[in-house]
């Protein structure tokens, strides 16, 4: 169970980071940003491949673990190739590598998702749609928050860069949080109505998920936006560090709550 959650988390994070870097203008951000953080994706997906192999028996009711393993390895290879492309300033090819990594990671995350209920019953189209939206919105929230923090750190090395790229990522982060909140509210309402009375422990984790992953992250996104108006990228980066922690706590809690259902919680 733990390995499945961890693998899913890494794949969602990879999707979001790849998309966030893909929409960041290479004309305004130095190529080193892409190169270094593609190495990060390479390391994460190497670990994800090991996690898939370690938990291969748990994939029996889900699907073929070999497909997820192959995609994780493929993402690591694409990330390495992409870092080389950015090293030689091949911007278009480098961005294509980012989008390939995003597509592969989203596909792997979908393959690693149980598309049947815990009782083996066929799920509805609405549940499947919510499940896909859950993967995408979760990845975008994780990826945009982490990428904004990493880009803020990059401003410390290259302070002459324009602020438009980090402003765009913070805006993407805020949009992802709002989308995540709407989706989680719908999923929670549907799940609660289907399950009836739920234990107090469930609602405690729901409160943690919302306070850290939604409310806390949104407040920190707003503070970052206001700090960038000063402008003070160093302080903004510090706030984004806290936002990353809140986002990680919120999304990991959400994954644990949603382990036996396609409803995003």
Image (cartoon, grey):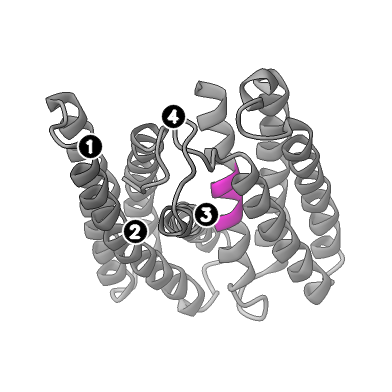
Closer to the chain start, of discs 3 and 2, is 3
Marker disc for residue 134 = none
* For the residues bearing labels 1 and 3, Cβ distance under 8 angstroms: no
Q: Position of residue 87 (x, y in %)?
A: 83, 61
Q: Earlier in the sequence, mark 4 or mark 2?
A: 4
Please identify, in this view, whether the residue under mark 3 or under mark 2 is nearer the observer.
Answer: 2
Counting residues from the N terminus, which is met first, the one under dot 4 or under dot 3?
Answer: 4
**Discs 1/2, front:** 1
Q: Which is more toward the observer, 245 or 129?
A: 129
Q: Residues within 10 Å of mark 3 (few under 14, many from 20)?
A: some
- Tell me, for residue 195, which label it has, or none: 1
Q: Residue at x 30, y 65 (%)?
A: 178
Q: Please, is residue 69 above or below residue 170 in the view?
A: above
Q: What's the residue at 78%, 63% (across, down)?
A: 97
Marks 1 and 3, how far apart in space? 41 Å
Specify few, some or many for label 1: CA neighbours under 10 Å numbering under 14, 14-19, or 20 or more. Answer: few
Residue for badge 2: 180
Q: Nearer the viewer, residue 238 or 91?
A: 91
Residue 261 falls in image quadrant: top left
Question: Are circles 3 and 2 on residues that touch, CB within 8 Å?
Answer: no
Q: Position of residue 141 (x, y in %)?
A: 42, 57
Q: Earlier in the sequence, mark 1 or mark 3?
A: 3
Q: Is residue 204 left or right of residue 81?
A: left
Q: Earlier in the sequence, mark 1 or mark 2?
A: 2
Q: Residues within 10 Å of mark 2 (few under 14, many from 20)?
A: many
Residue interval drawn in magenta = 11-16
Q: Secondary structure at mark 4?
A: loop
Which quadrant of the figure has residue 103? bottom right
Residue shown at 72%/54% (left/top)?
104
Is most of the magenta stretch helix, strand or loop? helix
Dot 4 corresponds to which residue?
A: 119
**What residue does disc 3 label?**
150
């Amino acid at each position: 169970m733990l390995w499945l959650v961890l693998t899913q988390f890494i794949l969602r994070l990879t999707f979001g980071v790849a998309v966030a870097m893909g929409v960041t203008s290479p004309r305004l951000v130095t190529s080193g940003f892409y190169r270094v953080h593609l190495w990060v994706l390479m390391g994460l997906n190497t670990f994800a491949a090991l996690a898939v192999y370690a938990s291969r028996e748990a994939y029996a009711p889900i699907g073929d673990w070999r497909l997820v393993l192959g995609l994780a390895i493929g993402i690591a290879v694409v990330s390495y190739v992409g870092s080389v492309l950015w090293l030689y300033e091949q911007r278009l090819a480098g961005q294509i590598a980012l989008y390939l990594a995003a597509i592969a990671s989203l596909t792997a995350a979908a393959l690693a998702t149980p598309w049947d209920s815990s009782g083996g019953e066929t799920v509805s189209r609405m549940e499947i749609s919510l499940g896909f939206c859950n993967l995408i919105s979760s990845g975008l929230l994780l990826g945009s928050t982490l990428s904004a923090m990493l880009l803020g750190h990059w401003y410390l090395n290259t302070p002459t860069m324009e602020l438009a790229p980090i402003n765009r990522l913070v805006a993407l982060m805020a949009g992802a949080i709002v989308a995540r909140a709407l989706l989680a509210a719908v999923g929670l309402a549907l799940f609660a109505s289907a399950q009836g009375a739920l234990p107090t422990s469930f609602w405690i984790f729901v409160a943690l998920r919302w306070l850290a992953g939604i409310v806390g992250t949104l407040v920190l996104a707003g503070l970052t936006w206001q700090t960038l108006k000063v402008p003070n990228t160093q302080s903004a980066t510090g706030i984004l560090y806290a936002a990353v922690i809140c986002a990680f706590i919120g999304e990991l809690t959400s994954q644990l709550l949603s382990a036996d259902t396609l409803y995003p919680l």
